[in-house]
Amino acid sequence: MRALHIQLDRSKGPVYKQIASGLRELFQEGVLSRDSLIPSTRHLAEQFGVHRHTVTRALEELVAEGWVESEPGRGFRVVFSPEANVSVPSKLWSDFPQIHGLGPDGVEDYDFPSGKPDLRLFPEEFFRVLRSCLRDIPSPDLLGYSDPSGSSALRLQLREYLSRMRGVARGQVMVTHGSQEAIFLLGQLLARGKDKLIAVESLGYPPAWDALRLSGAELAGVPVDQEGLDVAALERLIEHKKPALLYLTPLHQYPTTVSLSLARRERLLELVCRHEIPVIEDDYDHEFHYYGRPTRPLAGEDKSGLVIYVSTFSKLVYPSARVGFCVVPDRLLEPLCRLKRATTRQNDLLIQETMASWMRQGGLDRHLRRMKKVYHHRLEVMSERLEKIGLSFHLPRGGMSLWVDLGERGADIWARCWERGLRLRPGSFYALDGGLDRNRFVRLGFAGTTPEEIQSGLNILEQAVRVG
Ligand SMILES: Cc1ncc(COP(=O)(O)O)c(C=O)c1O
């Protein structure tokens, strides 16, 4: 069987993606023509020096995209032919919105992924509740169109939960597809237009920038320091041009993990109230707070009705549920629901009913108590080891990641880690201007990584620090 020429570079992202992309090129160039059989997965695995699963995953992707078909007992056959492929003038379909997405290098999976929960510890109890919802709720109540604001059972549970656990008691709760959808909808509603400006933290959370940019508004970065958002810098920005919206992560600032100081909170609330600037407060992992009680969200303090609260179950429960929520002033609910109806229509009812039942039975509270202990321990393991290595970092009161300063030689250390197989996301990813001076920092997620995994990953970091 002939060898296929596909260049693989493990530092350039998932290998199965590279294999799929290499095969696509071979189909397009006609090297593997229509009806030919692709070499066996075993053969390809040997040729590329990878596990057979990696090759199978690549081929499954190509089946899903319609390039190849699986022939039971024979392998995979090419069904793509270049001449049958319609060619669209490239100018016509080229002016797409700029999406920051995965970052400049296109890598999907980093080591020490920041802010990922450990789904290996996900409670079986949740699935029991899911099965009983399937069994007990009549199909028409689970499968139909429903209120875009969310199922009334889940909204009720959220209202109770937010008031009891977070001190957010005013406003209307709306269920969204993760916080991402809430941020997108709010950008559309409150800051649409090229002449608009949206203030965001920089360093900050790029996926929110992507969603907000789709409103057409321009983003302006406000710096962050040890006390969180620099409110004086925001004030200067307002004097220059008043933003239509401010987006921030006050409790565990993303990515630096610092909490907005009490003095700054007060000043910020006074400032946005005086200038009537709506605020999106993104409180994405509230309960994972290990030292003292988390500060009450700005939305709980706010009397002006300008602070819109956005949160999610992506960290607390699991991200593919795509259950997020926002708490908005009464007047915003209806226009938001109309926007949602025009886009994603509604959230899945089975997941909403399951979440609601699970919460009602105390499942969420139990799960969070358990995960908080696990994550707290992992935070201690990671911070002790980083101290031993001699790296400086901010010890946060909560969150799921550490923001680590690799020092003056940061960019070199980072590159050495990559050479040794430890793939860390560069700090410039979190800077609105892409500032490379940020590459001395890395955000290391501890929550999704066991103590043993933390130790072995940090062994590599230590070697990279000690060299040179
Ligand atoms: C700052 C911030 N907000 C929100 C989220 C969650 O997004 P979603 O609810 O869309 O999954 C994340 C996840 O990484 C985050 O880091």
Image: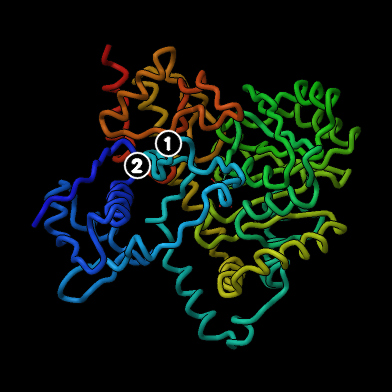
Q: Residue at x 73, y 73 (%)?
A: 147
Q: Position of residue 466 (x, y in %)?
A: 28, 16
Q: Residue furthest left?
A: 1
Q: Please state if 1 lies on the left or on the right of 26 as rendered.
A: left
The quadrant of the rendering that contains the C terminus is top left
Residue 468 appears anywhere in the view = yes
Number of other residues with Cα within 10 Å of mark 2, as a class: few under 14, some 14 to 19, many 20 or more: some
Q: Position of residue 272 (x, y in %)?
A: 84, 35
Dot 2: element: loop
Q: Residue at x 35, y 27 (%)?
A: 385
Query: Toward the viewer: 468 or 466?
Result: 468
- Amino acid type at circle 2 is Gly
Residue indicated by mark 1: 105
Tag 2 near tag 1, CB within 8 Å: yes
Residue indicated by mark 2: 13
The quadrant of the rendering that contains the N terminus is bottom left
Query: Toward the viewer: 281 or 233?
Result: 233
Residue 156 appears anywhere in the view = no
Q: Please state if 397 lies on the left or on the right of 246 as rendered.
A: left
Query: Toward the viewer: 442 or 3?
Result: 3
Q: Earlier in the sequence, mark 2 or mark 1?
A: 2
